[in-house]
Image (tube, grey):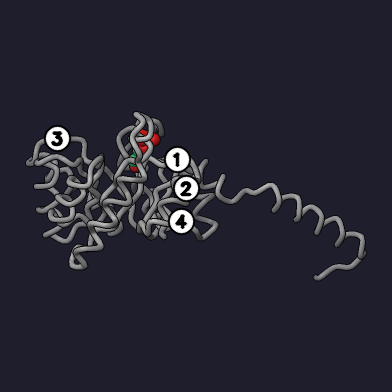
Amino acid sequence: MKFFVDTAEIDEIRDLADTGLVDGVTTNPSLIHKSGRNFFEVVHQICDLVDGPVSAEVAATDFDTMLAEGRKLSEIASNIAVKVPLTPAGLKTCRALSQGGTMVNVTLCFSPNQALLAAKAGARFISPFVGRLDDIAHDGMQLIAEICEIYENYPNLETEVLVASVRHPIHVLEAAKLGADVATVPPAVLHQMFNHPLTEKGLAAFVADWEKTGQSIL
Ligand code: G3P
């Protein structure tokens, strides 16, 4: 499974990228707004920090403008994945951009049929929002299961399932069990995934006992 970081906060991306465990970054207009930064500056900086795909979302909703915006965003860096919404105009834009060689991440996916249409449109990634489904008492991980099942029936489909709107480590765990290709994870959740109280307790005991030996390795 690939781990993308779901944020536009440079310091958080830099810290996690230093671990070598980050395969990409996803942003969206809300995350850009939260960063308080200039869109092009922060996306360019992220592309310099991370070699993997960096999702930058169009702002328009009509085909002509989304296509123009997508082409402009793709010029920022070679690892840009243009994000478009899962609408008829968005998928038309996806088709045009992907045929031109641009990576496209189709976002705001909430049904298996939507995911099937996005794959038909040549999406590199499909972003089903599991947390927002859970938020309204629907089973977000059931959507992932259905999309993975459908995609497995058609090996010629090259779209990667990018689990988004992740709220906690269990979403990542369940996504991995289902064989999703990518999880885009808020920094706080990624940090939670490292932690276990028995690891902390065991390490503290190792450190204390090693000090008692009076020895050093270096
Ligand atoms: O990448 C999509 C993700 O940022 C949406 O998450 O928490 O706004 O549902 P959320």
Instruction: Say if mark 4 contacts mark 2, CB within 8 Å.
Output: yes
User: In which quadrant is the C terminus drawn?
Assistant: bottom right
Which amino acid lies under the numbered mark 1 shown in the image of this protein? Glu
Mark 4, secondary structure of its residue: loop
Return the residue nearer the eye: 80 or 183: 183
Q: Where is ligand 1, by quadrant?
A: top left
Which amino acid lies under the numbered mark 2 shown in the image of this protein? Ile
Q: CA distance from mark 1 to mark 3?
A: 25 Å
Which amino acid lies under the numbered mark 3 shown in the image of this protein? Thr
The residue wearing badge 3 is 61
Instruction: Tell me which numbered mark, 4 or 2, is placed earlier along the sequence.
Output: 2
Mark whose residue sits in front, 1 or 3:
3
The residue wearing badge 2 is 13
Q: CA distance from mark 4 to mark 2?
A: 8 Å
Give how far across and how far down residue 206 sits, in percent: 80, 59
The residue wearing badge 4 is 22
Mark whose residue sits in front, 1 or 4:
4
Mark whose residue sits in front, 3 or 2:
3
Choose top left, top right, bottom left or bottom right for residue 31: top left
Instruction: Tell me which numbered mark, 4 or 3, is placed earlier along the sequence.
Output: 4
The residue wearing badge 1 is 9
Instruction: Say if mark 2 contacts mark 1, CB within 8 Å.
Output: yes
